[in-house]
Image (cartoon, grey):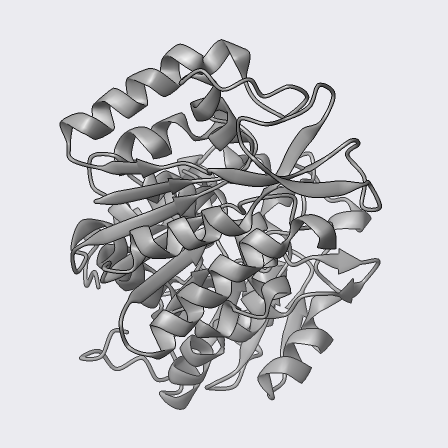
């Protein structure tokens, strides 16, 4: 990061995603905090003074105590191992004075950028107010880079700008999975609805050799081929769309793999009576909540020759132990293939991260993205404002 530039004593405006899950003021997941430490360590080692820009929650463009970030500095200091001060505003004299008080290598967290209306509107005047605080800008928040916000997009136009180490790793992993994968390449896509992943599916069938579908969206594809879903979740108004995606897959030589059996239940409940059944044999009133053992074997066989595997979305209702076995089995198989050096595996999306973590497989994947919307939009082939602007910035990474 600015490797050929002397940044000792210079102010780096560092955009991070610290919108971490909490219970009250207790942070319940430190993943995003821990992952950016290498960037901070690198900047501090070179004597830069670091001012962190971030948001928390969804305030209505004004200060709100419930969304103040003042509780975070002690948490950050404990996780990162060095002091982190706090400024009660992210612009103006308050922010400027807090930055001026930093020693070389010091770090300050500025208050929630979304307390200002100019942030989400990407207002040039607000971006300029931020830019006046420092000499360089680094974006290490891939997970918010699908937003054209001032601290993500507008600011990068005003200062020499680069991606941080975590963001570089994320982009490299996605490039390896989508843009320049080792082939054959396969994808696992689960989730409840086709309608929420239309762009994703439309893009993947043009790039994947194998596409495994699970969850409610698999039910929709099966229904489009004549299967009667009974009480299973599916989208009756998306059958023609599913057929069109299947036809597009055929055009591009992408094999779509659908479940052949499933775990069905009488009710949608953790303690519901359930049993494995072949997909055509669903009694009236029953619903499929997970893939069955035959499908697990089918998926493993379909992906066995792949050199790259991408995963987004669980294969069943993984939150309920009775209906998590399919997701767990495939997740652990992909993890084992990765550890054996047979495959590069990249996963992302909120439910995906939770499912892989629950399965005990998350550490076996090559890369797991904590980004939600940004990860999906990248997979959909969309341009991310916070990423594309860096390529045009002076001293871009």
In the figure, is residue 333 to the left or right of 251?
Answer: right
At x 24%, y 50%, the residue is 178
* Quarter of the image where one finds residue 380: top left
Q: Is residue 173 visible?
A: yes
Total marks shown come to 0
Viewer-closest of 103 and 287 = 287
The one of 92 and 376 positioned closer to us in this rendering: 376
Indicate the position of residue 127 as horizontal and vertical percent values. 43, 45
Residue 230 in percent (x, y) is at 64, 19
Which residue is located at x 39 percent, y 80 percent? 43
Query: Which corner quadrant of the image does residue 368 belong to?
Result: bottom left
Q: Is residue 110 left or right of residue 141?
A: right
Q: Quadrant of the N terminus?
A: bottom left
Q: Is residue 340 above or below residue 22?
A: below
Image quadrant containing the C terminus: bottom left
Can you say whether 228 is above or below 49 in the image? above
Q: Tell which of 369 and 158 is nearer to you.
A: 369
Q: Image check: 172 left or right of 251?
A: right
Q: Is residue 128 visible?
A: no
Frontmost residue, 101 versus 115: 115
Q: Position of residue 133 (x, y in %)?
A: 45, 61
Q: Residue at x 58, y 78 (%)?
A: 101
């Amino acid at each position: 990061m600015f490797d050929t530039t002397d940044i000792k004593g210079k102010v780096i405006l560092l955009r991070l995603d610290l919108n971490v899950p909490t219970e009250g003021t207790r942070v319940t997941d430190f993943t995003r905090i821990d992952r950016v430490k290498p960037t901070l360590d690198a900047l501090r080692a070179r004597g830069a003074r670091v001012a962190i820009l971030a948001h928390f929650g969804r305030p209505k463009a004004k200060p709100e105590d419930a969304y103040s970030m003042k509780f975070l500095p002690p948490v950050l200091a404990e996780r990162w191992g060095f002091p982190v001060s706090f400024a009660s505003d992210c612009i103006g004299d308050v922010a400027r004075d807090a930055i001026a008080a930093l020693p070389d290598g010091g770090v300050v967290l500025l208050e929630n950028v979304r307390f200002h209306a100019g942030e989400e509107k990407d207002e040039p005047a607000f971006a300029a107010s931020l830019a006046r605080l420092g000499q360089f800008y680094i974006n290490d928040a891939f997970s918010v880079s699908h937003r054209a916000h001032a601290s993500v997009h507008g600011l990068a136009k005003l200062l020499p700008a680069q991606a941080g180490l975590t963001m570089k790793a994320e982009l490299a992993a996605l490039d390896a999975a989508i843009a320049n994968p080792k082939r054959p390449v396969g994808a696992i896509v689960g989730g409840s609805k086709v309608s929420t992943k239309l762009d994703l599916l439309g893009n993947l069938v043009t790039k994947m050799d194998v596409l495994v579908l699970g969850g409610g969206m698999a039910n929709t594809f099966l229904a489009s081929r004549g299967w009667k879903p009974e009480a299973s979740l599916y989208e009756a108004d998306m059958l023609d769309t599913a057929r069109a995606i299947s036809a597009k897959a055929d055009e591009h030589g992408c094999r779509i793999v659908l479940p052949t059996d499933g775990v069905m239940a009488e009710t949608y409940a953790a303690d519901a009576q359930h049993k494995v059944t072949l997909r055509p044999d669903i009694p009236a009133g029953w619903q499929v909540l997970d893939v069955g053992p035959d499908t697990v074997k089918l998926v493993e066989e379909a992906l066995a020759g792949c050199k790259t595997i991408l995963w987004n979305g669980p294969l069943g209702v993984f939150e309920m132990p009775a209906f998590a076995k399919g997701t767990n089995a495939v997740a652990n198989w992909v993890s084992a293939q990765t550890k054996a050096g047979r495959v590069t595996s990249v996963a992302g999306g909120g439910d995906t991260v939770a499912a892989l973590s629950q399965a005990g497989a998350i550490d076996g994947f090559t890369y797991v993205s904590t980004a939600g919307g940004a990860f999906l939009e990248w997979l959909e082939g969309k341009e991310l404002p916070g990423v594309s602007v860096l390529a045009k910035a002076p001293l871009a990474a």
